[in-house]
Image (tube, helix red, strand yellow):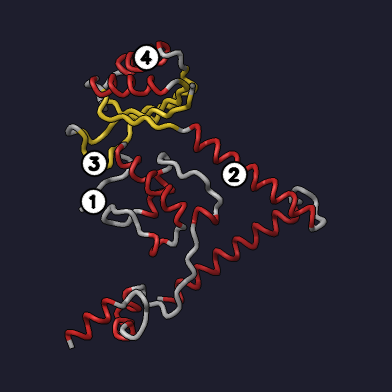
Amino acid sequence: MHRQYELVYIALPDSTEEQLAELHQQVQTVVDRFGGTIERTEAWGRRRLAYEINRQREGVYVLNILNGPGTMTTELDRRLRVLDIVMRHLVIRVDEVMEKETRKQTRRKAATVSRRLRRGLPAEPTEQELSRRKAEADDADTGVDSFGEGDR
Amino acid sequence: MNDFDKDSRGSGRGGGKGAGKGKDEKGARRGGGFFRRRRVCKFCVEKIDYVSYKDVKVLTPFIPERGKIQPRRISGTCAKHQRALQTAIKRARTLALIPYVTD
């Protein structure tokens, strides 16, 4: 059973490009061994930590989106905990929530379309409508602001 | 006098008789508003179904000065989204995107 996971790890801020590449390679080998795939890798780069970890104030963040079995995550978890270069890591399962999200959004869109058709409107909002709605939203924003100021 | 105080605290939730005394204090504490602004769930309004731990910008408005998670009664978030928000904030905390405490 293959599932989708998100893996984020924080490496030491003074780790070199090679070290990071090696780390990525290690993750890759583990994933391969379990017959999984790395779908996407995002390097967030150096970021300031919200609090100190191992006396460090910064860290190099890397996000991986993985497909694979659950046993893969336990192994990844174990490996990453052993490595000194990784200060912190987090593996979470995302396939279920993502599916839910897309399902909800498609349902919402379908509902909007059917509602519009019932009212005798075209399925998609016209340009005119969009611009008017935007103007209304802007008005509402300013209205709330002045309201807040009057409050004080 | 003391007894009365205790009483009012006990039944404070129900609003009832005892609430009359505490009203001034409470009203003052809530930003001095005579009319309370209608609170709506931000996530419902913006139709966000999944609260991600990666979007620090989305999470920060729900983390007051001290670093605690803002309660529903203040922020107006609905129960469903508050639950999602809670897990997102906790995940972001482990990744040091958001502090556990700030003082």
Q: Secondary structure at mark 4?
A: helix
What is the three-letter code of the residue carrying label 2? Lys
Q: Nearer the viewer, mark 3 or mark 4?
A: 4
Q: Secondary structure at mark 2?
A: helix
Write down the quadrant of residue A151 in the picture.
bottom left
What is the three-letter code of the residue carrying label 4? Val
Q: Residue at x 52, y 36 (%)?
A: A98
Q: Which residue is mark 2?
A: A104
Q: Is residue A111 above or below residue B24?
A: above
Q: Are marks 1 and 2 in contact (CB under 8 Å)?
A: no
**Quadrant occupied by the C terminus of chain A:** bottom left
Question: Residue B100: image x %, image y %?
Answer: 26, 46
User: What distance separates the C-alpha of mark 1 from that of mark 3?
Assistant: 9 Å
Label 4 or label 2, whichever comes before in sequence order: 4
Q: Are marks 4 and 2 in contact (CB under 8 Å)?
A: no
Which residue, as the protein is rendered here, is positioned at the far bottom? B1
What is the three-letter code of the residue carrying label 1? Thr
For the residues beneath circles 1 and 2, the answer to whether they share a chain is no
Q: Is residue A143 above or below residue A109?
A: below
User: What distance separates the C-alpha of mark 3 from that of mark 4?
Assistant: 30 Å
Write down the quadrant of residue B21 in the picture.
bottom left
Q: Residue at x 65, y 45 (%)?
A: A107
Write down the chain letter for disc 2.
A
State the mark number for residue A30: 4
State the mark number for residue A51: 3
Q: Which residue is mark 1?
A: B102
